[in-house]
Amino acid sequence: GAGVSQSPRYKVAKRGQDVALRCDPISGHVSLFWYQQALGQGPEFLTYFQNEAQLDKSGLPSDRFFAERPEGSVSTLKIQRTQQEDSAVYLCASSSPGTGIYEQYFGPGTRLTVT
Amino acid sequence: GDSVTQMEGPVTLSEEAFLTINCTYTATGYPSLFWYVQYPGEGLQLLLKATKADDKGSNKGFEATYRKETTSFHLEKGSVQVSDSAVYFCALSDRGGGNKLTFGTGTQLKVEL
C-alpha cells in the first residue's frame, strides 16, 4: 500500500515568511509524529498525535511552531515568521498498534531552506 | 532525559569487510531499541529492532543485540556490500514517552570495491 507522503518536498522561504508542511500518513495509522533533522544530525522529536489529539508537543522549539491534525488523518506543521535556524528537513512518521511494537514509518521529508 | 550516542563517521570499508557501528544509550525506563537506515536520496527505513534485554534483532545480514548491562546496541554485519553504503541511525523508544524516538547523530558508511 501507499506509504507516508509529505508535501512539498522542497520549500524555500524568505526569513519572516510563514510556511505550512503537509503529511499524509499511512491509512489507518492512529499515531503521527513530526521530527526535525538538521544537516548532519539525527532527527529530533517535535510533536505527537494520537488520532486528532496532540498528546505531546514538548519538542516544538518555539511558539512559532504549530501542528494540527483536525480529522485524525492528514497533519500540517506550520512555522510562523521563519528564521534561518529553522532550515532543516522535517520528517513525518506514522504508526499503529497493529504494527507490533509501534514501528514508525517515515515519509521522505520536506527540506525547508530559509534565506 | 533519554539519549543515544553512536560512533562518528564516516566509516569506510572494503567490500566483504566486517562492520561494527557502536551505539550506547541512556534511558530512564525500559526502552525498545532500533537501527534505522537512510540510503542516498531516500527516507528513513527501519532496519532492525529489539524490545527487551538480550533480544537480538536481525535483517538483511545485519544484527544487533540489546545489552542492558552495558546499555549498548551495536550494529554488526559480517560481510558488507557496496549497496550497504548509507547513513545508519541508532534510536530508542521509551514506552513512557509515547513511543517517540530518540535518535543518535547517525554514522555514514561507505563501502568501496
Image (cartoon, coloured by chain):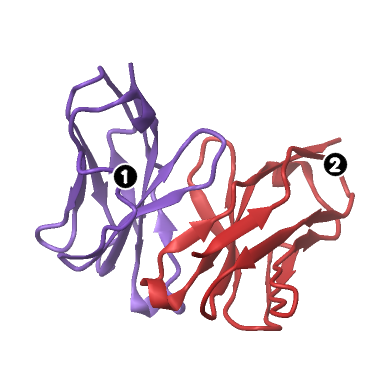
Up-down relation of residue A93 to residue A108 (above or below): below
Tell me whether marks 2 and 1 sit on the same chain. no
User: Dot 2 falls on which chain?
Assistant: B
Question: What is the number of callouts on the image?
Answer: 2
**Residue A24 horizontal/vertical position (percent):** 25, 51
User: Dot 1 falls on which chain?
Assistant: A
**Residue B88 horizontal/vertical position (percent):** 64, 50
Residue A61: which disc?
1
Q: Quadrant of the C terminus of chain A?
A: top left
The kind of residue tagged 2 is Leu
Left or right of A99 on screen, residue A11: left
Task: Indicate which label's residue lies in the foreground, 2 or 1.
Answer: 1
The kind of residue tagged 1 is Pro
Up-down relation of residue B8 to residue A72 (above or below): above
Left or right of B67 on screen, residue B50: left
Q: Secondary structure at mark 2?
A: strand
Q: Quadrant of residue B54?
A: bottom right
Q: Nearer the viewer, residue B69 or B112?
A: B69
Disc 2, disc 1: CB below 8 Å? Answer: no
**Residue B99 horizontal/vertical position (percent):** 41, 70
Q: Nearer the viewer, residue A27 or B75?
A: B75
Badge 2 is on which residue? B13
Chain that the image shows in red? B
Q: Secondary structure at mark 1?
A: loop
**Residue A97 horizontal/vertical position (percent):** 35, 78
Chain that the image shows in purple? A
- Residue drawn where x is 25% and y is 17% of the image: A14
Q: Quadrant of residue B40?
A: top right
